[in-house]
Image (cartoon, rainbow, N blue to C red):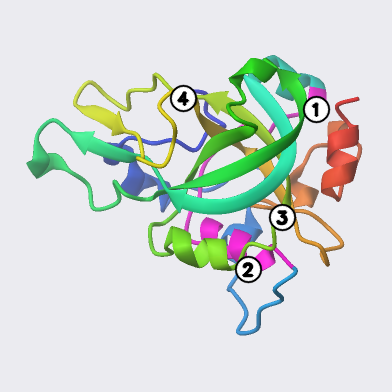
Amino acid sequence: MKTNIVVMSAAALALAFTATACGGADSATTAVSGTSDASSVRELTDLAGQNVHVDYDPLTSPADARKKADLIVEGTLTKVENGIKLAATNPAQASPEQDAYVTFVVNVNKVLDGDARKVKDGKVYVSVYTDGTTSPAKLTALNPQAKVVAVLDDITNWRPSPDETVIRPANIPAAAPLYAPYTDGIWLQGRTDTQMFGVGTKPSDLPPGWKHAKTVTQLSATFK
C-alpha cells in the first residue's frame, strides 16, 4: 500500500501508536474539550485521530493527489458505521487492535477526480483507522453532517499480509469498493466551523502547493 494510506496489518498496528508523524500531526494528540458544539466537526475528528501517529509522505499538491489517488470526492459525511476487521489465519495471532477501523459513509456531491462509476448509489465507504476506543455510534452522534473532501485509495483487494484477510462490514454493499483516505487527504467541516479539520492533521500541515486552503470549499476549488 502507499505510505500515505492509513491501513495497517494487525502486526503493524501496535507500531502505529509510537510512530512519529511527518509533516506534523499535532491535532492527533489534541485533547477533546469538555464542551461540544453540535455544529462543529472538531470533536469528531479529535476523537477519530486521538493516539494515532503515522509516518507519511505529504501530498504535495492537487496534481500530486490526482496522480496517486484512485478517487477524489466532495460530499457530506452522513454517518459513521462499523469498519473493516482484520482476521488472522491463526486466531492466536490476532491483535487486540484488529477492530480499530470505522467506516465514514460519504454522500458524494461531486467527483473531483477519478471514475465516477465507482460511486455506488451516490455513496463511498471510507475505512478510517482509529485507536479503537471510540465507537462508530459516538462518532455519528458528533457528526454535524460535515462537508468532506476526500482523497482516496481503492483497498477493495487489499490483503494486509499472507496470514491476514480483510472482513467487510455487513453495512457496506457487496458491489461497493472499499476505500481508505490518504493521511492528509480526509478533510471535514461543520456548519459553524471557520476552517476544515483532518483526522490527525491540520490545514497548516498541507504543503504550499495546496494554495494555503483552509476550508473544504477552498480545498475543493484547488482541483478545478
Residue 73 vs residue 207, the one in the foreground: 73
User: Dot 3: within a 10 Å radius of its alpha carbon, few (fewer than 14), some, or many (20 or more) residues?
Assistant: many
What amino acid is labelled 3 in the image? Ala
Q: Secondary structure at mark 1?
A: loop
Checking the image for residue 61, the label placed there is 1
- Which label lies toward us, 2 or 3? 3
Is residue 205 located in the magenta-colored stretch of the structure? no
Q: Identify the residue under disc 2.
A: 43
Do callouts 1 and 4 mark residues in contact (Cβ within 8 Å)?
no
Residue 110 vs residue 58, the one in the foreground: 110
Do callouts 3 and 1 mark residues in contact (Cβ within 8 Å)?
no
What amino acid is labelled 2 in the image? Glu
Q: CA distance from mark 4 to mark 3?
A: 24 Å
Checking the image for residue 146, the label placed there is 3
Q: Earlier in the sequence, mark 2 or mark 3?
A: 2
What amino acid is labelled 4 in the image? Ile
Q: Left or right? Give the position of 118 relative to 130.
A: right
Q: CA distance from mark 3 to mark 1?
A: 23 Å
- Which label lies toward us, 2 or 1? 2
Work out whether 155 lies above or below 191.
Answer: above
Q: Identify the residue under disc 4.
A: 155
Which residue is rendered at x = 33% and y = 23% of the image?
159
The percent position of residue 87, horizontal first and vertical second, equals: 22, 36
Q: Which residues are magenta?
A: 40-62
As drawn, the residue found furthest toward the bottom would be 34
Q: Left or right? Give the position of 104 relative to 58.
A: left
User: Is residue 188 something one can see in this rendering?
Assistant: yes
Do callouts 4 and 2 mark residues in contact (Cβ within 8 Å)?
no
Q: Earlier in the sequence, mark 2 or mark 1?
A: 2
Q: Earlier in the sequence, mark 3 or mark 1?
A: 1
Q: CA distance from mark 4 to mark 2?
A: 27 Å
